[in-house]
Amino acid sequence: MNKLYPDSGVELSKFTASNYDKVMNIASFGKYKSFINRAIADIEISKDDKILDLGCGTGRNILLMNKYTGNNSLLIGLDISEDMERQFEENTLNYPNISFINKRIDQLFELEQKFDKIFISFVIHGFPHEIRKIIIKNAYNNLKSGGTFNILDFAEFDMAKMPFHHRFIFKKIECKYAFDFIARDWKSILMDNGFDNFEESFYFKNYVRLLKASKS
């Protein structure tokens, strides 16, 4: 598999993409289901929300979001993987308010409409920082004024203070960009890119965070 970012873990092999939900369950020691449900609830979705899920994968998260929406909602998943697209379409077949767009999130784009909420889950940490800035710009450009950018990913923490077994696993399974991600001040980064009014929720022994930021 040829990668644009050889040191990244977000460009998945065909096997991993085809078994993504199972891989996430295993990597989180079976806890992914519990904290993803809590995180989706903490987004505070309204019934008429228009939501864009960047790097949407199989549609698992967007189906959880859909439980909070009504007839006038719109949920769009955006991903570049054809394997993810196939699974997404199969999983969301019976939901006319859910659709998929095959598009890269690491290149600038503007869709035809603006969204109330944009969500990204365990994707942005896997890119070089200059590419993360493009993703943040995409979120800003495709949000309504006052809309929220919701980043579910690793929290900021000191690797040296992590318990040994947690640190060992993190080093084994994560790409090098993740170590850079946890060391950065993400509120300052988002503020420099036009966001404010931050809210945080923590999960998984505070190593995972939902960071919500409003478009100024």
Image: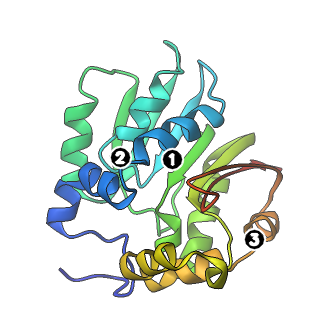
Q: Indicate which disc residue 111 carries.
A: 1
Q: Nearer the viewer, mark 2 or mark 3?
A: 3
The one of 20 and 171 positioned closer to us in this rendering:
171
37 to the left or right of 92: right
Identify the secondary structure beneath mark 2.
strand
Distance between the Cα atoms at labels 2 and 1?
10 Å
Q: Position of residue 12 (x, y in %)?
A: 27, 68
Q: Residue furthest top?
A: 71
Q: Residue at x 42, y 81 (%)?
A: 175
Distance between the Cα atoms at labels 3 and 1?
24 Å
Task: Establish if 89 lies above or below 106.
Answer: above
Q: Residue at x 59, y 83 (%)?
A: 180
Q: Given the image, on which type of amino acid does mark 2 rest?
A: Ile
Location of the N terminus (image quadrant): bottom left
Sequence-wise, which precedes: disc 3 or disc 1? Answer: 1
**Coloring scheme used:** rainbow
Q: What residue does disc 3 label?
A: 189
Q: Residue at x 44, y 81 (%)?
A: 168
Q: Given the image, on which type of amino acid does mark 1 rest?
A: Leu
Q: Given the image, on which type of amino acid does mark 3 rest?
A: Ile
Q: Are marks 2 and 1 in contact (CB under 8 Å)?
A: yes
Dot 3 alpha-carbon crowd within 10 angstroms: few under 14, some 14 to 19, many 20 or more: few
Sequence-wise, which precedes: disc 2 or disc 1? Answer: 2
Q: What residue does disc 2 label?
A: 101
Task: Establish if 129 lies above or below 149.
Answer: below
Dot 2 alpha-carbon crowd within 10 angstroms: few under 14, some 14 to 19, many 20 or more: some
Q: Position of residue 164 (x, y in %)?
A: 52, 80
Q: Residue at x 16, y 65 (%)?
A: 14
